[in-house]
Image (cartoon, rainbow, N blue to C red):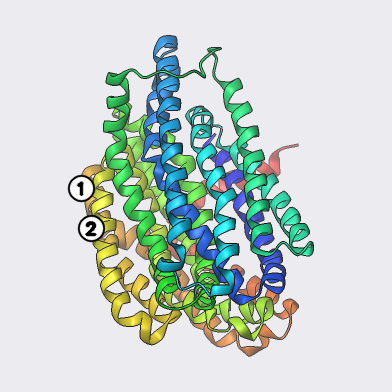
Amino acid sequence: MILKNAVMGWTSKAVNFLTAIIATPIFISYLGQSSYGAWLLLMNIWVLMALFDMGVFLAFTRFIAHDLANDDRQAALATAANSFSLYLLLSLAVLLAYLGVAFTAETLLNIPPEMHSAFRWALLPLGLTSALGLPSRVFEGVLFAREKLYFISWVNLSFALARVVITIWFLTLGWGLMGIALAHSLTTMAEYMLINWAGWREMPYKGWVRLSWHWPLVKKLATYARDTMFAQFMGRARGQAPSLLLGALASPAAVAVFGIGLRLLNHAMDLISALVVSAQPRFSSLESAGQYETWRAIFLRTTLYTSFIAAYLCLGILLLSRPFIHLWLGPDFALSAPVAMILAAPMGLLMSLYPCESVMVSLHAQGKLGWLCLAELALLLALAWFSLARWGALGAAWSLALSLLAFRPWWLSLHVCRRLGIGWVWFWTDTVGKVWLSQALAGLPLFFLLGPWTDRSWLHFLSGGLLLSALSGLLFWLVALDRTERRFWLAKLRRREAAP
């Protein structure tokens, strides 16, 4: 099930990336650089509003999974009904928050006067969609508890394609910023409806969608959600702060330049997240059963392959982001390539440690992740205060990069290694370190081989990408994989060849 969920998750994220490559130049051609930057600001606000989930989703999935596993009908009904009621209250809070942003956007963000009205009206459909999406998380949580993430990924993939088509149609009608907001909202609402239907069918007890307010159960959900909420809030705040600060202190055009560079890394992070999220339910079940030997083995193996994918993607960004952006968006976004290159190694290291974050969630130590994110956010704000006005998008990139390197790699890995009984130095040298060493060795000749010719055409660029992939994979096999792991894959290959 982990492999099935991971493959479908990767497919969904890969399709999202490909559609973004195709759609972004079209969006910019209709909107212009400043309006596209305003759209990125709207998406940053959308992401921040998702914090009104308050950690309830993870709390709900934990308790509903336990209830369904024990076939406890009454407990499952109560968990679903109380979570649904709690989400309705949070939906009201989301609407009020969007209204607050709509009336203060001109003061908070440096948006050109001619865009004020369009920006404010575009918040309306996004706010309604955010509010209605919260109760839908109950149905999504049932699918998550059943380990049917592959269905959610399939729905996301299908509507990602539909979203691009509808958005382009609305833009050709001249609807501008409001058109892209409407397309996003309509397709997201349709996505919610399909997931709701599937989640309802997966719940074996009919009549479970009802309102209920049983204070002891709500308190239990809120207590579990508290640490998760803090971690999510700090993580999202750290992630959205650079773009929002640029929107407040610079201009939407600077947001667009920074956002394009960051988006390349975010798509890479989505691929890694799809793998680790697929393993999360297994981590939690092994922790509950006390099977620490098996847990350690799966954790180390997940970290090995997560680190390879992260290091490979970031090596590609370091070597190929400049020709890619040149071919993709042209000279107006040339500064986006240095942004991506500055962020590649720090965010790649962050991706390598995603399994550590998953272990922290399984150990119910989300609160410590929240404090870690708070420290990173404080450092980010201090650095941005001095760098944004002088260096704009590059200053935002350096601020984010340094804040990610300062605390997380060292404290997070040390804490997880202690809890799982793994040597910290061995973890870095024999797992993450060996993988990154293999990719560094691949990068040395590629730095000289992948020259200016890669930006001559897409064919030249793809040739460079294939060369990078071949050398990267070969050195990962020779340097990072031990003899046991190589034998495992060779045995799998022989079985496949022997199959009729």
User: In the depicted view, which residue is nearer to us: 426 or 420?
Assistant: 420
Residue under numbered circle 2: 411
User: In the depicted view, which residue is nearer to us: 451 or 54?
Assistant: 54
Quarter of the rendering containing residue 123: bottom right
Q: Residue at x 43, y 32 (%)?
A: 87
The residues tagged by marks 1 and 2 sit, at their Cα atoms, a distance apart of: 11 Å
Q: Are marks 1 and 2 in contact (CB under 8 Å)?
A: no
Quarter of the rendering containing residue 74: top left
Q: Position of residue 289 (x, y in %)?
A: 32, 26
Q: Is 137 positioned to the left or the right of 192 in the image?
A: left
Above or below, comparing residue 437 to residue 228 in the picture:
below
Above or below, comparing residue 306 to residue 86 in the picture:
below
User: In the depicted view, which residue is nearer to us: 187 or 348?
Assistant: 187
Q: Position of residue 148 (x, y in %)?
A: 56, 32
Q: Position of residue 4 (x, y in %)?
A: 59, 38
Q: Residue at x 39, y 70 (%)?
A: 245
Q: The C terminus lies in which quarter of the figure? A: top right
Residue under numbered circle 1: 418
Quarter of the rendering containing residue 391: bottom left
Q: The N terminus lies in which quarter of the figure? A: top right
Three-letter code for the amino acid on which mark 2 is drawn: Trp
Residues packed near mark 2 inside 10 Å, few (<14), some (14 to 19) or many (20 plus) = few
Q: Is residue 150 visible?
A: yes
User: In the depicted view, which residue is nearer to us: 373 or 31?
Assistant: 31
Q: Is residue 282 visible?
A: no
Three-letter code for the amino acid on which mark 1 is drawn: Arg
Q: Residue at x 33, y 59 (%)?
A: 430
User: Dot 2: what SS?
Assistant: helix
Q: Is 274 positioned to the left or the right of 193 in the image?
A: left
Q: Position of residue 476 (x, y in %)?
A: 49, 64
